Image (cartoon, coloured by chain):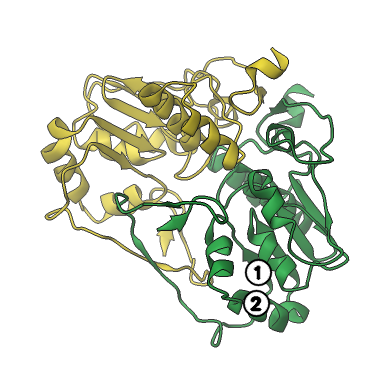
Chain colours: A green, B yellow
Amino acid sequence: MVPAMPGGPVMDLGYMLQPKLVATHSFSDAPALDVLLVPGGFGPVTLEQNNDTSIETFLRRRFDQLEYLLSVCTGSAILASSGLLNGHRATSNKALWSWVTTHGENVTWVPSARWTEDGKIWTSSGVASDAAGIDMMYAFLKHLYGEDDPNLVATMNAIEYTPHTDPHWDPFSIVHDVPGHANGNLESCVKPVGTHSRDD
Amino acid sequence: MVPAMPGGPVMDLGYMLQPKLVATHSFSDAPALDVLLVPGGFGPVTLEQNNDTSIETFLRRRFDQLEYLLSVCTGSAILASSGLLNGHRATSNKALWSWVTTHGENVTWVPSARWTEDGKIWTSSGVASDAAGIDMMYAFLKHLYGEDDPNLVATMNAIEYTPHTDPHWDPFSIVHDVPGHANGNLESCVKPVGTHSRDD
């Protein structure tokens, strides 16, 4: 049972057959980490309703040793609750914008952004595993390895994904009528990576 | 360890920390199913190398009772091996096209297709959980519930995904130089679902 919306009715997902996910480590025995990604969905809502701040504690303990801290969707609410976003720019899922943005202090919540980058913190719109998360991850891997890295190009074309490469394109800030959204274009034109020479 | 390509060198994924996935049922005690989706990736390659045909056996046993059988990426190689694609249209990941299309008899492999639909069998390009799989799934849910279904529109906009809605748009058949590909456009312009009234 998960809440459909913060404070709202719960959804009964009992009819779903889904495999069990078993973690490799707990917060107390996790190995050293270079990059940490905090996913979203309704998990952060449930954790808050249960006063569970174990992720926030883990993030504060590990942040200095991380090279990068990333979040997808409502994961940025947890980053904000941990205090690590104070004074920084961030974004989140626009469908849950009003709830997410109650977290943290002096966070510059960017209403129209597919993703944001501020120092070593990257935050994405959308839910885990969706396209906004993939768009941020493609931008992040370009940042790490360079746009022309042959493994990156090969991987993007093996998964057959055409990324949105403009972080400011965010039609969902318009769809969900987020306060302060830019009057941008709903439409974005995409094509496979590494195809500049074919039609530019 | 998984093979990088059929017959090719193996990739060492030992550096990856990933949670364990535990299935809820085995092939022998699976409940009645309305819809069955066979995912892809390198799993079908490994199964073939190990002469493991348990999925094919399960598909043949359950096919008549299914309302729909779907595949993503190389999952269509398993559908083909099972014989269920004989005489039918199908597609697959274009990066592994030459391997996938050796399977089955009298299968009409469609070289330029984001996804195909033939009777109760739907097949998708791309890998599991990527955009081509999501594009097919959006088309499939439209087929089941209708384009204007409010839950479908709300879900697509909650995950913040702008689908490609033309099954014939397939720039990856061009990128991977699949024999017989259409000379289509590499670029596709996408926007959120349910926004016709805003800018049409």
Whether residue B58 sits left or right of residue B187 in the image: it is left
Location of mark 1 (residue)? A36
Q: What residue appears at the point 64 percent right and 44 percent down from the top-left corner?
A: A95
Q: What residue appears at the point 68 percent right and 62 percent down from the top-left corner?
A: A77
> Local crowd at mark 1 within 10 Å, few (<14), some, or many (≥20)?
some
> Local crowd at mark 2 within 10 Å, few (<14), some, or many (≥20)?
few
Q: What residue appears at the point 23 percent right and 36 percent down from the top-left corner?
A: B34
Frontmost residue, A170 versus A15: A15
Query: Quadrant of the image for the C terminus of chain A?
Result: top right
Q: Amino acid at mark 1?
A: Leu
Quadrant of the rendered image containing residue B104: top left
Query: Quadrant of the image for the N terminus of chain A?
Result: bottom left
Badge 1 sits on which subunit? A
Q: Amino acid at mark 2?
A: Leu
Quadrant of the rendered image containing residue A107: bottom right
Q: Residue A33: which numbered mark, if any?
A: 2
Above or below, comparing residue B96 to residue B143 in the picture: below
Whether residue A28 sits left or right of residue A96 in the image: it is left
Percent x, y of residue A91: 75, 52
Quadrant of the rendered image containing residue B58: top left
Whether residue B47 sits left or right of residue B98 in the image: it is left
Residue A90 at least partly seen: yes
Above or below, comparing residue A194 to residue A146 in the picture: above
